[in-house]
Image (cartoon, grey):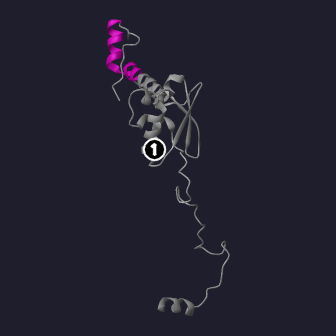
Amino acid sequence: REAELAREAAPVQPATAPAESAKFVAPRPPAAGEDGTPPAFTGSWPVLAAGLPLKGLAQQLAYQSELTQVVGRTFHLRIPVAALGENGVSERLQQALCDHFGEPVRVVCEVGGVSITAAAADAEARAERQRQAEAVIEADPFVQGLLRDFGGQIVPGSIQPRAA
């Protein structure tokens, strides 16, 4: 009661326009989940898919699928072959996503062409490591000396990058 009386007795500060006040703080939007909606997934599907603790066909479903959209709690995936989404495989991926996000989500699969997948990202990373390994060998002075002094050549496909 004393605190209430003290507030009532305190002088009233004049209101200032937001532009005039250096201390104006715009109201923040509610954090994910505060208003009852799930957090929207805005990350990289290939990174998420590659990191999920899955095995077998469920892992391949995640690895070879492309996220087309997320509507509410539903992940819409495009898969290259129908077999990846059959026989409870999508349900295992759905459970892994539920565990990852800590809330129920749904997975819907459609068959079609894919391009932005964990498999494509992995293939590109392997190709880049291969290009780098070949460039290092070709630029190595010792290797160049051997090729020059002994008339050698590098056998195409013989250079293997170190495992990542």
Q: How many marks?
A: 1
At 43% from the left and 26% from the top, the residue drawn is 57
Q: Position of residue 137 (x, y in %)?
A: 37, 20
Q: For mark 1, what is the residue?
A: 98
| Relative horizontal placement of residue 37, taking residue 141 as reference (left or right) | right
Q: Position of residue 79 (x, y in %)?
A: 54, 27
Instruction: Give the answer, above or below, for where 97 lies relative to 109.
Output: below
Question: Which residue occupies the foreground of this view, 55 or 20?
Answer: 55
| Relative horizontal placement of residue 153, taking residue 6 as reference (left or right) | left
Does the magenta run of residues contain 94? Answer: no
Q: Which quarter of the rendering shows the C terminus?
A: top left
Label 1: element kind: helix
Q: Position of residue 126 (x, y in %)?
A: 43, 25
Instruction: Give the answer, above or below, for where 57 lies relative to 10.
Output: above
Instruction: Give the answer, above or below, for where 121 lies relative to 70.
Output: above
Which residues lie in the magenta part? 133-151
Instruction: Give the answer, above or below, for where 69 lies relative to 149.
Output: below
Question: Which residue occupies the foreground of this view, 135 or 151?
Answer: 135
Question: Which residue occupies the foreground of this view, 51 or 13?
Answer: 51
Q: Quadrant of residue 153?
A: top left
Q: Position of residue 82 (x, y in %)?
A: 54, 23
Q: Main secondary structure of the magenta part?
A: helix
At 36% from the left and 10% from the top, the residue drawn is 148
**Residue that protrudes farthest toward the top in the picture:** 151
**Circle 1 Cα neighbour tier, 10 Å, few/some/many (<14 / 14–19 / ≥20):** some
At 58% from the left and 69% from the top, the residue drawn is 25
Does the magenta run of residues contain 136? Answer: yes
Query: At label 1, which amino acid type do we have?
Result: Cys
